[in-house]
């Protein structure tokens, strides 16, 4: 799952490199891991609840719709909270809200209520949204400006590690402990008895209880950890001065916000339907448990690609890299649609490798040259993560024309990403960056 890139705001650590931030960075890396883990565990939850409650694709993808709706509804309120209580308290509150959402999975399972599951997911996602709003810029400013990209790439790698291991964890603790999860071909075709439904619904309790406990421990650790205090130093210019400038003069941001939004439709749509897709008799003909292992390859490809992308971008312009991976994702998706068996299966899995640099590259291109407007532009780009909610459209298409043809939706999304790389990302009316020194 993508983590937001930093703003271009920098806070120097003072004379002689006075502030030590290694321990804080290690703790924050754990937070990035946990929200990546919790987000991609939805890819296990979608097919599991689809089988348990006998849902169609559109109904099952309400999981992602509700989850990413939280980004749209909660980003601005959380930004105001961040301004009032600061970064450290915001991170602690975010982790606590996440833990509460994970804990709500227990009554949802007891009640066997799909609506309760959706409510629990909204609470969980609200906590993650607060972490996105607080932790991303904090990582960017706690250390020297010349190593900000290095710090961010490090914590994003931990985010990708979380997205890679989550399907394995979900397979072992959800699919392996459920009747529908171990059935050949996905197990969702026949009627589910009341007893089986009750047992399979309760299979989600243990993993989410463990997540809640880990999050509460992490919140306590953060509360007791002395994090560097950056106060209000990230404010680069006064509000009065920012009002004189206009975000709409910056083409790269104007087209970058929909690029993030549209890309998330593709990323979440594929991730959410991959287990069901691989279970199809014409594709992989396997159980959900077996398919979950291949979903780890999909997200693992994103992690590997992020490291490779960071290396290649030393010599290749980001726009060229973005154009290359968007073309690659488009070709692989169309190949999967037009073929069957292992060719179709591995083509769609390899799309994860192309996804790797898309989000951070679009994000950094989107805020390039914004100068004093960087914070506002970054906020809009974070809100655009709500595009993941519209991955539910792929479920609607799948119910109408079949799951394989529904991948035409992410294919169309890559066309827009290609447009952004070639033309939409060009910087207009660039403003100079400023460096803010912390006391």
Image (cartoon, rainbow, N blue to C red):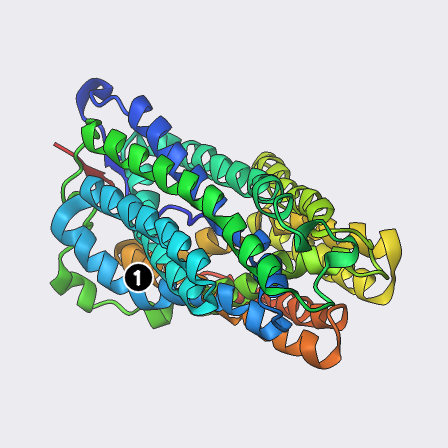
Q: On the rendered image, what quadrant is the C terminus found in?
A: top left
How crowded is the residue under tag 1: few (<14 C-alpha within 10 Å), some, or many (20+)? many
Q: Residue furthest front?
A: 195
Residue 211 % position (x, y): 41, 41
Q: Is residue 95 left or right of residue 203?
A: left
Q: Name above or below for residue 16 compared with residue 168.
A: above
- How far across and how far down the image is residue 343, in percent? 86, 53
* 316 left or right, relative to 118: right
Q: Residue 386 at what x, y percent from top left?
A: 43, 65
Residue position for label 1: 75
What residue do we see at 50% from left, 64% from top?
Answer: 63
User: Where does the image place residue 428, in percent across and percent down from the top left?
Assistant: 42, 64
Q: Is residue 313 visible?
A: no
- Identified at 78% across, 65% down, the residue is 334
Indicate whether 320 appears above or below 222: below
Q: Is residue 155 visible?
A: yes
Residue 415 appears left or right of 227 = right
Please report the residue visible at 74 percent of the width from the left and 79 percent of the height from the top. Answer: 401
Q: Nearer the viewer, residue 355 or 239?
A: 355
Numbered circles on residues, count: 1
Depth check: give the residue in front, 145 or 379.
Answer: 379
Q: Which structural element holds mark 1?
A: helix
Q: Nearer the viewer, residue 375 or 304?
A: 304
**Which quadrant of the figure has residue 315?**
top right
Residue at the farthest bottom position: 400
2 over 192 or under it: above or below: above
């Amino acid at each position: 799952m993508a983590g937001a890139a930093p703003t271009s705001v920098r806070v120097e650590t003072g004379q002689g490199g006075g502030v030590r931030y290694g321990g804080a960075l290690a703790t924050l890396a754990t937070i990035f891991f946990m929200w990546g883990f919790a987000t991609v565990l939805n890819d296990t939850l979608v097919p599991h609840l689809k089988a348990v409650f006998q849902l169609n694709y559109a109904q099952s993808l309400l999981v992602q719709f509700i989850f990413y709706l939280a980004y749209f509804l909660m980003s601005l309120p959380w930004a105001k909270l961040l301004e009032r209580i600061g970064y450290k308290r915001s991170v602690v509150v975010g982790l606590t809200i996440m833990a509460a959402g994970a804990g709500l999975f227990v009554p949802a399972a007891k009640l066997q209520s799909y609506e309760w599951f959706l409510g629990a997911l909204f609470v969980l996602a609200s906590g993650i949204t607060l972490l996105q709003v607080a932790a991303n810029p904090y990582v960017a400013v706690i250390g020297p400006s010349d190593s900000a990209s290095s710090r961010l790439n490090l914590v994003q790698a931990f985010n990708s590690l979380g997205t890679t291991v989550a399907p394995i964890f979900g397979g072992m603790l959800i699919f392996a402990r459920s009747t529908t999860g171990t059935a050949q071909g996905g197990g969702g075709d026949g009627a589910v008895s009341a007893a089986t439904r009750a047992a399979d619904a309760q299979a989600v309790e243990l993993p989410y209880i463990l997540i809640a406990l880990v999050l509460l421990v992490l919140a306590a650790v953060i509360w007791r950890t002395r994090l560097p205090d950056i106060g209000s130093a990230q404010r680069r210019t006064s509000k009065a001065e920012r009002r004189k400038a206009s975000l709409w003069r910056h083409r790269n941001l104007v087209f970058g916000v929909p690029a993030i939004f549209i890309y998330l439709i593709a990323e979440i749509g594929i991730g959410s339907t991959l287990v069901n897709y691989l279970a199809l008799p014409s594709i992989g003909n396997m159980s959900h448990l077996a398919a979950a292992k291949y979903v780890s390859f999909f997200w693992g490809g994103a992690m590997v690609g992020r490291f490779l992308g960071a290396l290649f971008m030393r010599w290749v312009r980001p726009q060229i890299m973005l154009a290359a991976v968007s073309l690659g994702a488009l070709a692989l998706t169309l190949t999967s649609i037009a073929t069957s068996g292992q060719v179709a299966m591995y083509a769609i899995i390899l799309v994860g490798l192309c996804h790797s640099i898309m989000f951070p590259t679009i994000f950094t291109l989107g805020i390039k040259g914004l100068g004093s407007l960087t914070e506002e532009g970054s906020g809009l780009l974070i809100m655009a993560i709500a595009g993941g909610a519209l991955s539910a459209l792929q479920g609607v298409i799948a119910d109408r024309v079949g799951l394989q043809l529904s991948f035409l939706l992410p294919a169309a999304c890559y066309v827009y990403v290609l447009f952004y790389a070639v033309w939409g990302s060009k910087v207009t009316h660039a403003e100079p960056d400023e460096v803010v020194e912390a006391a």
